[in-house]
Image (cartoon, rainbow, N blue to C red):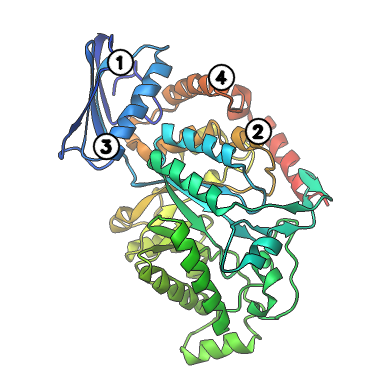
Amino acid sequence: MIKMIRIIPQPEKIIEKKGVCQNEENISFIADGSVASEGYRAVISPDGVKIYASDERGFFYGKMTLEQLKIQSGGTLPCAEISDRPEYAYRGFMLDSARHMISVSEIKKMIDAAAMLKLNKFHWHLSDDQGFRIELDSFPELTEKGSVRKGDNFGSMCRSDKEYSGYYTKAEIREIIAYCREKFIDVIPEIDMPGHTSAILHVYPNLSCKKEPVEVKNRQGIYKDNLCMGNPETLGFIKTLLDELCELFDSEYFHIGGDEAPDEYRKTCPDCQKMIKENNLESTAALQCFFAEQVKDYLETKGRKAIVWNDILKGGTVDKSITVQRWMDAKNNAFKAANSGNKVIVSDFRPYYFDYPYGMYPLKNVYRHNPVRNKALTPEGVKNIIGVEAPLWTEFVDNPERLEYLCFPRWLAFAETAWSAPHNKNYAQFKSAALTLCDKMKKDGYTCAGKKDMDMPLHKRLSDVIKFFRAFLSK
């Protein structure tokens, strides 16, 4: 690896040549089946540039490398030969639009940054206890009523007595999908189920175990009212919902949640207990696995693959065709699932949850985190880790400046883990390049954390964390 040329994420191999390219407009794109999927080979000479790739994504990422080379080299394009390919096929970021909506223009701005960093999956969280954010023809009341809550009570950081409402029209969603398609980013929608469904149950309380009125929530938390998985109407509702959403979203993946779904009401629900007995299930937790597999089966008829959060594995194993997303997993159930054949996405709460302050997750910690360094993983399990994802939840993020500040430069550190081989990573070199790139991003209108915030000394880290949790717990 040549240290003089440094971009983010760092390419697999760079051979530096003398001189600079005098004819940047002269770019040739040459098909080469020997280049790995999404990878590219770039030859930059004084006369122009040749990019070799086996697919369109590879050509695109080659162009992204050229753009960053110019940024890091002060506007010139240094001559070099570059060979590159991704470490992981799945390189994702998640934005939560359920708690606080992110404008279409801001989402596009984040997509531009993601493309520059060679991220390729946009996990879009669109439904939760605090709001349902999709225009629907099949359930117009869900759009109209499920998108409204009585203000904000997310600690002292986001507090308002003003009614909060909003949703994305189908036209806006198609606009985002089309914009992502141009940048080779797949949009993966998430409708969380059976938990985090207060917005749905507010409109359709008959789909809950209690069948009692439920409010759209105005604060963070884990709530006992879930979709009743023993009620046949629930699966019917989900199928109709998926029919419409699968026409709207074209990704091969569909995220069906599965996290933080308390089973207290299931234990006494006649419908749930009947479903458990009829299907010889061992527990209420096993019922959730059974329900997820029913939804997975229906998604497969649409040509889609299901993703679930690792919480669902508390009920046992799930079909090997279901992809598991690991976030908080003390018993390493997700890695055990990888060992036995499930594909797994790593989104470790520490340090990939970027809604938390830099005092908790400094830039250095994000960069140095190894998503597969775990004794629970076997060599076969490592092969089933298809990628990584950095989520950002918006309970405490209600403006684009805060969103960007939390992501940049941590997205840069994360992207290097997602794309670059571990042996090509070097924190000191990365941080130098990150500072240069952040300076350019600021000129382009992004809000980036200052150098002092990225890696705080311990006493400031503690102060930053205490300040955050005081605001978090404030009533």
Q: Work out whether mark 3 precedes mark 2 in sequence or the reverse, and give the earlier one.
A: 3
What whole-number distance in Å separates the C-alpha atoms at marks 3 and 2?
33 Å
What whole-number distance in Å separates the C-alpha atoms at marks 1 and 2?
34 Å
Give the secondary structure at mark 2: helix
Occupied quadrant, residue 420:
top left
Answer above or below: position of 212 versus 58: below
Q: Work out whether mark 4 precedes mark 1 in sequence or the reverse, and give the earlier one.
A: 1
Tell me whether circle 4 and circle 2 mark residues in contact (CB < 8 Å).
no
Quick check: can you spot residue 365? no
Tell me whether circle 3 and circle 1 mark residues in contact (CB < 8 Å).
no
Identify residue for label 2. 401
In the rendered structure, which amino acid carries the disc numbered 4? Lys
Task: Report x, y in % for residue 435.
Answer: 51, 21
Give the secondary structure at mark 1: loop
Q: Work out whether mark 3 precedes mark 1 in sequence or the reverse, and give the earlier one.
A: 1
Report the mark closest to the observer, 3 or 1.
Answer: 1
> On the rendered structure, is 207 left or right of 338?
right
Location of the N terminus by quadrant is top left
In the rendered structure, which amino acid carries the disc numbered 3? Gly
What whole-number distance in Å separates the C-alpha atoms at marks 4 and 2?
14 Å
The residue depicted at 45 percent of the width and 21 percent of the height is: 433
Identify residue for label 4. 443
Q: Work out whether mark 4 precedes mark 3 in sequence or the reverse, and give the earlier one.
A: 3
Report the mark closest to the observer, 1 or 2.
Answer: 1
Identify residue for label 1. 24
In the rendered structure, which amino acid carries the disc numbered 2? Glu
The residue depicted at 49 percent of the width and 84 percent of the height is: 282
User: Dot 4: few (<14), some (14–19), or many (≥20) neighbours within 10 Å?
Assistant: few
Tell me whether circle 4 and circle 3 mark residues in contact (CB < 8 Å).
no
User: Dot 1: few (<14), some (14–19), or many (≥20) neighbours within 10 Å?
Assistant: some
Identify residue for label 3. 39
